[in-house]
Structure formats: structure tokens, C-alpha cells
């Protein structure tokens, strides 16, 4: 068994080694190439998972990779929140790879080697973000994730992919270099360190309006969290092939965003410090606004992937809202929601891709009666939708429960109102899809090539069934993410008692 | 502080200076290239050796003809000079390696030996500037390097190279004249030309109008050579139409050496006068630097010629270096000097990549680059590395530069400046990504001929610079240490 620091290093390097393998086999040995991806994913998940038990028990293994400049280290520390993110990203990568193989071959996509290579780099970057021990390390991998996903977003090379890629890269780079980088250097200037420390590093060092400015720089600088108005990149990224939208723009990239937000709030600012400084009130309102506004926009999207994208924007702000409530219990909800939303949303995207592969349909209005042709896909879709709404027996219920408890405990009635309203809106834009898919008669489109279709390729169906199962399983067995989340908040909970 | 006489100093200048006439006498392209190559690498070897000796002896000198300063001419090497000759020597050696194949394609064969003679003169002049301790001798070297670079630029294939060279000649001569007027005024007031000597005399007369005027002439004159906005008008044309390798060499060294001259004047000649407190130089430099960062970056966005685009980007990057100086703190100065080094690496790699594309396909405009990511993957990848560094993406040298500069601005309490530095980087995203998008996301034009094979003698120097761009971005300890040492040494004069 690997020692903890070795495991950290292995988790970050392994996907890159896998990437080299992918290039080595290339297009000529497609099966071997895909086998490399799957084996790498499986080994990575085992390595990441092997750290879990110790983390729940309070261990915080750390590793200083090297010194970049005097006093500035590339450093990794595993803490519970990062562990949740790493588990989700590496676990879903395996499922997504099964799905990718079915999807990419089913749609005869070009440049598949580049596609799998960029995926491995993106996963390595995600693990790097998850395990970052200081803000510099997080920033380095954050930018690496942006750049490695750009070729995936523009995969098709068509004009709409070009313009989508432009928005994607433009917003993510502009916010991170223009705002986040400044916030980070300013933090270093004030606090003298960038290490993630329980209780924060700014307490006693920053005061007054500076706290508010810094918070602004971080919250909008982390563009991947898609807080309005820096959310436009996410719908733009939907030009990518569906596996990219599923794993990266429902899980890895967006979760990297909200993960960074929570991480900054907990380990850079510190909850007590923010509570005392009362600098974050606006954050609750912006997050609340984003939740409602994105839901309303989602309601009006006919393109299925775009509707899912706006739903993601709304769900991401749940995490930010939960964190901004600043109660330990809502923080647990935020951590839970990172996992819960990941499973639910990847299922929904898998379903959207499945429909596209089998039926070549992309619009909500084309889905009448499709549930009878694709029962597995649409059942999984229904489970994902329930999780988005937050109904039992799905994972979304658990996280929403904690968030709502936190909001009630701290008397944040605005947050409570937002959660209730958005639940209704979620129901309004997901349930009709499920209804028409199962209960409406199919509309015949003349001359459509794919009228007599069945289910999507097997890999696709297996993948979406697995994630749908995971969404339900997280409701019945939330122990691991919950244990991790509670372990994260242990100092605060102890302090309160 | 221990001083030591070191004859290697004079060798550094003499070697290329002597090689130039020999090149002319040989009248043979291959022989001239071989000699230049040997000399350029020998110069690199000497400068590395000198840099290592600087660890134990912080100041070295060599007195020409054995005449003691301030009567004789003295060569002095300290950490700043050492850092600058390292940059010049590295770029010199790599671009001389790169030159052979590139030049054979761009210059008529009967003139090639003259090209190498001019390159040797230019190298000699730039090195001389960095090690002389005499204000007038510096002018001589400035002219040697400038005159040879006018010739080098005029060798470009495009006829517009001639008018660009002429424009540079006029502007450069005005700059040099301003410099010599400034030196003359100081000589009139102090009776000496030796920098160390000047620095001891100047404090007593610093507030006279003559010295103030001298400093003004010096600053403006050097700013012209430095291409500090708005005195940069000569630069885009010169870089765009010069032969590829000349652009590489000049972009990575000439403006850097000019910045060094500015530092020498501020911190050595006026070392015992607090220049920034006595003269209203800070707001002036800062305004010009900021204007350069924004105006030149915006101009770069609108260029169709890639070399011209990179040239405007150079003007913007010079803005960052001058900004570091204008912050007027040790940290700021470190940032400026560090960016001198870092920018030489990335811009060298970028211009070499463009040179390779010109070599293989003749491509110089944005449109020619369509599908280049597939046609010349290795070259385009090096371009992307350099481009990312211009933006300031982590794990490239550009990130380190920006890190140090922004930290310096914050340390000095100038937070709007910090925000502006990063805001101007956003413009770099636009002009770099314009190229990346065309090269990778546009299809290869129909009927485009296969690009000619780029020889290893061009690919290796290009990738050496690209890899250094990454290496000093991933592990910046060495470069930041050298820059800090140089800045501390300069500030120590205060």
C-alpha cells in the first residue's frame, strides 16, 4: 500500500501517465487506447479511495512537491472537502469513460486520441485542485484545467465551436487572471501566506472594506463557479461532445469552481472571521439571484443541453448560497451538494447524449413519447430530475435538507425563500420533460432518418444506469461524503460547543 | 567588497569585434557562419564563467591599456551587467545557430558573409554596453550596435525593410544624439566620463539646471532606443520587415540592453542622488509604461502581420519592464529586471517560431496561418508556449514576471497599478488567441503545398527557448535570485 504522500503524488501523475499511454496507442489500436483510459481510471479511483478512511478520522496528509520561488511552494494537502471532490471526479471518470467509448464511436467523432488525452490532463488538473495545499497550487491547476478543456469544447472545429470556445476561454481566463490572481497576490501581501488553514489566514490581518473587495475578487474571479454575471461560458461550452458536457461541465470543471469557492471561504477567510466582518451578505443575494434567474432562463430553453446548462448554473449557486450562510451545518450541505449534484447532473447529461446518439434529437419539444423507445434512458433521466428538484429517494434531497437546516438555524429567510421557489421552478422545467416522454404519443416527423430507433449503444446505457443508481444510493448510504463533510467542519462544530 | 581585475571582460567584446572584419575578409558564407557560430558560443561560455565568478567577487573590472580610472577607460561587471550579458550571450548563441538555414533562404548568397559581419558587430556592441564603466564608451558601443542593426534590418527581403531601417536610423540617431548631449552636459559640469567617478561628484550639483537637463536628455534619448511608448514608432516596422533571425536577435536583446542603460544612469551614474525623489521621473515613466501596456496591446490586436503583432506586443512588454523600474522599490526593480530575462526567452521563442513558418511556407499574415497547427505541429506548439507566457499563464515565465511585478505594486501600496497590470494581460489573451484559433480551428486551406522541412538547426534553438520559457516558469528560483541580486546591487548605490 502506498504511503499517503506517495498516494497524493500518484493520484496527480497517474492520469498523465495514462495520457501518454493514450497517445502511444493512438488511433491504430483503439481498443488498447480505451483500455488504458479505463485501467487508469480504475487505478486512480482505488488510490484516491484508499485515503478516505484516514481523512474521516482526522488525518491531513501533506506533501511539498517543490519550491517554485523563494517561499512559494507547490504543495498538496488532503482535507475532507478535497477528498469528496477527488472521489467524485475520479469515480465518475470511470463511468464517463465507458460512456465516452459508446458515444464517440456511436457518433464516429474525429480526433478521438486528442479527446482522450485532453481528458486525462483535465482529470489530473481536477485532482490537483482537489488536493491543493495552498492557493498558488490551486491556481496553477485551475488554469491548467481551463486550457486542457479548451480543445475538448472546440472538438468539432465548426464555427459555432470556435465562437463557443472563445466565450469559454475568454471568460474563464479573464476572470481568473484579472480577478482571482489579483485576489491571491493581495492575500499573500496581507497575510504573508497562501496555505489553506482551518479557521482562515486573514483573521486579524485584514479589516474593513478590504475584506469585501477580496471576497469580490475571489467570488467572481473563480469564474468556474458560474456566479452571475460570469456564467456565460457554461452555456457556451455546450457545443462540446456530450461526454465533455457530462463529466467536465457537470462535474469536474464546475465542481472545481464551487469547490474553490467553499475552500476559499473556509480555509482562506474562515467562517468566524466572515461572520464577524459581515462582509458576505451580498454573496447570499447574488447566489440567490443566480439560482432564480438561471432557473427562469432554463424554463425557456428548448435545447435540452442548454436547459441542463442553466440548471447547472442554478445548482452551483446552491453550493455558494449554502457556503455563504456560514453555518457549519449548511457548509456540510454545500459539501454534500457537490457530490449529489454531480451524480444527478451527469445522469441527465448522459441521458441527453443517449437521446442524441440514438435518435439525433436535441430539443425538448422533440421528445414526445421517447420514453417508450428508450425506457432505460428516460428512467435514469427521471431519477436525475428528481435529484435536481430535491425529492426523496435521491441524493439531492439530503443536501437540500442540510442547506435548508442551516438557513433556518441562522434565520436566513431570504435563503429559505430562494430554496423553496427554486424547488418549484426546478419541478416546472424538469417534470414536463418526463411527462411528455412517457405519456404523450410520439409525433411523427416526415423523412426523419432515425424514426425507428431503440436504446443507445450499450456503453451509454450502462453508464447512465450506473450514475442513476448512484444518485439513489447516495440517498440511502450518504455515509462517506457525510462523514467527510462533518470531518471538515469538526473544528467549527467543536468550537461552537 | 573585493574587487578583481579580470581580462575575460575585454575578451567578451574583442572576440566578436575582431570576428567581424575577418568575416568580411573571408567572403564566404559558410566560413563566416562557422566563425560567427564559434565566437557566439565562446561568448556564451565566457559569460557563464563570469557569472559564476560573480558569486565570489561581486564586482570585476578591467582597465584598458593599464590606465587607471577615471583617466583611462574602465570595464566593470557587477550582477546587473552579468545578468544582461548572459541574456545577450544566450540569445546570441541560439540565434547564430538558427541563422544559417533561415538566412540562406532570406538573403542573396553573395551578401551572407556581410550579414554575419554585422551580426558580430552588433553582438560586440551590445555586450560592450553591458560591461563598460565609461559613459562615453557606452555611447560608442551604442552606436556600434545601432549602426549594425540598421544594416541588418535593411537586409530584409521586403522592400519596406529599407524604409523601416531608414526610419529606425533617423529615430535611433536622434536617441543617440540626445544621449551624447546628456553625457556632454555632465562632462561639462564634472570633468569626468567615468560612471563611478560621476556618481561621487553628481550629488553636490544634482539640483543645477544643467544636470537636470542632462538627465532629461539621457532619459529621452534612451527611451527612444528602448522604444518606450510613445517613442516606439520605429519598432514595429523594423521588427516586421527585418530578416527573421535579426528580429529574433534584436527583439530579445537590443531593447533589453537599452533598459539596462537606463538603469545604469538612474542607479549608478545618479546612484548617490535619489533620482526618483529629486526629479519628477516616476509619474512620467509610470504613465508612459501604462500607456505602452494598453495602447500597444490594443494595437497588437488589430495587426494582420504576425511579426508586426509580436512587435507591438514587445512595446507593451517593455512597458511592464519600465513599470517595474518606475515602482522604484527593490521588489519593483527585481520585477523589471526579471521580466527583461523572461521576455527575452518567450519573445525569442515566438519570433523563432514565426521565422520557422516563414522558412517553411512563407507565412507572415494571420490568414497564412490557417491550419498551421496541423501543418507544422512542433513549431506551432512552441508558438503556443510563448503565447501562453505572454498572457501570464502559470508554469510559464510570464506568470513569474507578473507575480513579482504585481506583488511589488501591492507592496508599494499601489493597488490600482496591480489591477492595471493584470487588466492589460487580458488584452494579451485576445491577440494570442486570435492566432491559436486560426492555427488550430481553421481547416488547412485547399491546395496548400506541404511545408518545407524545417532543419533541426532552427527547431532546436526554438525549442530550447520554449523549454526555458517553461522551465524558468516552473522553477523560478535561479532567475528570481539573479534578478533580486542584481536589483539589490543597484539599489545598494543609494
Image: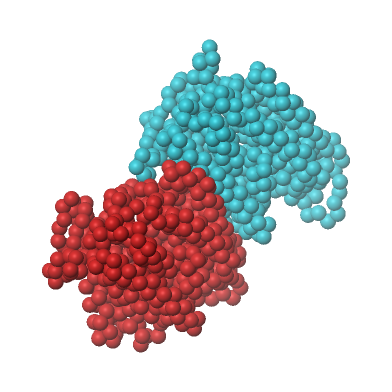
Chain colours: A cyan, B red
Above/below status of B34 relative to B346:
below
Residue A414 appearing in the image: yes
Residue B106 appearing in the image: no
Nearest the viewer among B92 and A147 is B92
Residue B203: % across, % down:
29, 56
Residue shown at 74% from the left, 50% from the top = A360
Residue shown at 59% from the left, 51% from the top = A169
Residue B339: % across, % down:
40, 55
Residue A66: % across, % down:
36, 41
Q: Is residue B269 left or right of residue A448?
A: left
Nearest the viewer among A104 and B138 is B138
Residue A427: % across, % down:
78, 31
Above/below status of A349 relative to B369:
above
Q: Is residue B61 left or right of residue A390?
A: left
Residue shown at 74% from the left, 38% from the top = A293
Nearest the viewer among A389 and B208 is B208
How many dots with numbers? 0
Amino acid at each position: 500500500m502506498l504511503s499517503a504522500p506517495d498516494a497524493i503524488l500518484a493520484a496527480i501523475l497517474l492520469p498523465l501517465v495514462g495520457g501518454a499511454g493514450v497517445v502511444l496507442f493512438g488511433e491504430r489500436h483503439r481498443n488498447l487506447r480505451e483500455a488504458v483510459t479505463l485501467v487508469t481510471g480504475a487505478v486512480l479511483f482505488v488510490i484516491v479511495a484508499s485515503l478516505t478512511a484516514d481523512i474521516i478520522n482526522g488525518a491531513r496528509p501533506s506533501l511539498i512537491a517543490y519550491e517554485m520561488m523563494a517561499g512559494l511552494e507547490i504543495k498538496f494537502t488532503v482535507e475532507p472537502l478535497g477528498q469528496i471532490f477527488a472521489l467524485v471526479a475520479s469515480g465518475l471518470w470511470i463511468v464517463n469513460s465507458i460512456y465516452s467509448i459508446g458515444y464517440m464511436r456511436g457518433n464516429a467523432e474525429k480526433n478521438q486520441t486528442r479527446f482522450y488525452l485532453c481528458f486525462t490532463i483535465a482529470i489530473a488538473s481536477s485532482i490537483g485542485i482537489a488536493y491543493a495545499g495552498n492557493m498558488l497550487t490551486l491556481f496553477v491547476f485551475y488554469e491548467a484545467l481551463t486550457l486542457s478543456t479548451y480543445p475538448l469544447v472546440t472538438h468539432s472545429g465548426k464555427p459555432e465551436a470556435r465562437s463557443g470556445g472563445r466565450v469559454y476561454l475568454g471568460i474563464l481566463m479573464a476572470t481568473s487572471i484579472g480577478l482571482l490572481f489579483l485576489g491571491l497576490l493581495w492575500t499573500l501581501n496581507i497575510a504573508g501566506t497562501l496555505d489553506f488553514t482551518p479557521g482562515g489566514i486573514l483573521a486579524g490581518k485584514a479589516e474593513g472594506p478590504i475584506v469585501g473587495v477580496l471576497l469580490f475578487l475571489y467570488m467572481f474571479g473563480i469564474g468556474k463557479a458560474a456566479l452571475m454575471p460570469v456564467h456565460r461560458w457554461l452555456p457556451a461550452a455546450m457545443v462540446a461532445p456530450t461526454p465533455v458536457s457530462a463529466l467536465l461541465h457537470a462535474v469536474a470543471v464546475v465542481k472545481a469552481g464551487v469547490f474553490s469557492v467553499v475552500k476559499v471561504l473556509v480555509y482562506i477567510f474562515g467562517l468566524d472571521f466572515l461572520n464577524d466582518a459581515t462582509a458576505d451578505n451580498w454573496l447570499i443575494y447574488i447566489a440567490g439571484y443566480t439560482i432564480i434567474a438561471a432557473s427562469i432562463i432554463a424554463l425557456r430553453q428548448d435545447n435540452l443541453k442548454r436547459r441542463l446548462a442553466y440548471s447547472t448554473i442554478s445548482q452551483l449557486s446552491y453550493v455558494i448560497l449554502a457556503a455563504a450562510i456560514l453555518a457549519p451545518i449548511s457548509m456540510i450541505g454545500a459539501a454534500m451538494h457537490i457530490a449529489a449534484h454531480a451524480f444527478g447532473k451527469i445522469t441527465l447529461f448522459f441521458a441527453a447524449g443517449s437521446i442524441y446518439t440514438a435518435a439525433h434529437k436535441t430539443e425538448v419539444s422533440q421528445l414526445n413519447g421517447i420514453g417508450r423507445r428508450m425506457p432505460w434512458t428516460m428512467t435514469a433521466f427521471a431519477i436525475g430530475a428528481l435529484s435536481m428538484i430535491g425529492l426523496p429517494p435521491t441524493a439531492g434531497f439530503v443536501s437540500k435538507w442540510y442547506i435548508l437546516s442551516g438557513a433556518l438555524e441562522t434565520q436566513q429567510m431570504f435563503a429559505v425563500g430562494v430554496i423553496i421557489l427554486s424547488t418549484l421552478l426546478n419541478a416546472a422545467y424538469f417534470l414536463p420533460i418526463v411527462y411528455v416522454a412517457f405519456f404523450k404519443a410520439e409525433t411523427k416527423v416526415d423523412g426523419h432518418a432515425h424514426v425507428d430507433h431503440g436504446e443507445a449503444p450499450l456503453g451509454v446505457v450502462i453508464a447512465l444506469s450506473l450514475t442513476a443508481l448512484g444518485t439513489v444510493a447516495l440517498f440511502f448510504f450518504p455515509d462517506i461524503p457525510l462523514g467527510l463533510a462533518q470531518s471538515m467542519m469538526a473544528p467549527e462544530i467543536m468550537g461552537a460547543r | 567588497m573585493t574587487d578583481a581585475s579580470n581580462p575575460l571582460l575585454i575578451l567578451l567584446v574583442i572576440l566578436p569585434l575582431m570576428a567581424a572584419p575577418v568575416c568580411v575578409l573571408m567572403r564566404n558564407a559558410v566560413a563566416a557562419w562557422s566563425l560567427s557560430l564559434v565566437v557566439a558560443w565562446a561568448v556564451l561560455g565566457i559569460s557563464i564563467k563570469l557569472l559564476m565568478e560573480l558569486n565570489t567577487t561581486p564586482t570585476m573590472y578591467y582597465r584598458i591599456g593599464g590606465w587607471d580610472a577615471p583617466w583611462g577607460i574602465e570595464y566593470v561587471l557587477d550582477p546587473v551587467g552579468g545578468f544582461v550579458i548572459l541574456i545577450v550571450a544566450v540569445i546570441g548563441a541560439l540565434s547564430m545557430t538558427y541563422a544559417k538555414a533561415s538566412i540562406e533562404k532570406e538573403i542573396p548568397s553573395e551578401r551572407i558573409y556581410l550579414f554575419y559581419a554585422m551580426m558580430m558587430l552588433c553582438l560586440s556592441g551590445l555586450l560592450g554596453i553591458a560591461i563598460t564603466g565609461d559613459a562615453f564608451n557606452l555611447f560608442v558601443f551604442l552606436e556600434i550596435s545601432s549602426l549594425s542593426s540598421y544594416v541588418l534590418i535593411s537586409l530584409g527581403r521586403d522592400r519596406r525593410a529599407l524604409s523601416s531601417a531608414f526610419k529606425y536610423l533617423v529615430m535611433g540617431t536622434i536617441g543617440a544624439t540626445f544621449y551624447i548631449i546628456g553625457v556632454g552636459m555632465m562632462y561639462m559640469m564634472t570633468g569626468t566620463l567615468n560612471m563611478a567617478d560621476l556618481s561621487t561628484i553628481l550629488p553636490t550639483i544634482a539640483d543645477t539646471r544643467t544636470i537636470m537637463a542632462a538627465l532629461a536628455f539621457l532619459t529621452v534619448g534612451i527611451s527612444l532606443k528602448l522604444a518606450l511608448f510613445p517613442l516606439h514608432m520605429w519598432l514595429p516596422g523594423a521588427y516586421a520587415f527585418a530578416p527573421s533571425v535579426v528580429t529574433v536577435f534584436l527583439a530579445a536583446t537590443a531593447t533589453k540592453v537599452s533598459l539596462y542603460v537606463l538603469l545604469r544612469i538612474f542607479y549608478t551614474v545618479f546612484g548617490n542622488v535619489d533620482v526618483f525623489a529629486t526629479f519628477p521621473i516616476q509619474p512620467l515613466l509610470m504613465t508612459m509604461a501604462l500607456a505602452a501596456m494598453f495602447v500597444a496591446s490594443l494595437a497588437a490586436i488589430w495587426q494582420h502581420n504576425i511579426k508586426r503583432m509580436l512587435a507591438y506586443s514587445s512595446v507593451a512588454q517593455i512597458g511592464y519592464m519600465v513599470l517595474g523600474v518606475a515602482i522604484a522599490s527593490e521588489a519593483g526593480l527585481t520585477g523589471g529586471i526579471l521580466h527583461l530575462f523572461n521576455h527575452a526567452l518567450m519573445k525569442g521563442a515566438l519570433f523563432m517560431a514565426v521565422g520557422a513558418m516563414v522558412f517553411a511556407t512563407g507565412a507572415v499574415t494571420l490568414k497564412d496561418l490557417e491550419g498551421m497547427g496541423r501543418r507544422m505541429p512542433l513549431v506551432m506548439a512552441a508558438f503556443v508556449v510563448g503565447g501562453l507566457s505572454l498572457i501570464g499563464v502559470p508554469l510559464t515565465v510570464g506568470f513569474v514576471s507578473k507575480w513579482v511585478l504585481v506583488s511589488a505594486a501591492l507592496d508599494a501600496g499601489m493597488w490600482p497599478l496591480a489591477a492595471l497590470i493584470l487588466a492589460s494581460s487580458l488584452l494579451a489573451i485576445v491577440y494570442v488567441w486570435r492566432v491559436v484559433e486560426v492555427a488550430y480551428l481553421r481547416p488547412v486551406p485547399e491546395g496548400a503545398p506541404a511545408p518545407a522541412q524545417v532543419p533541426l538547426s532552427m527547431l532546436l534553438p526554438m525549442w530550447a527557448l520554449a523549454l526555458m520559457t517553461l522551465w524558468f516558469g516552473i522553477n523560478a528560483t535561479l532567475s528570481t535570485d539573479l534578478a533580486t541580486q542584481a536589483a539589490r546591487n543597484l539599489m545598494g548605490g543609494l
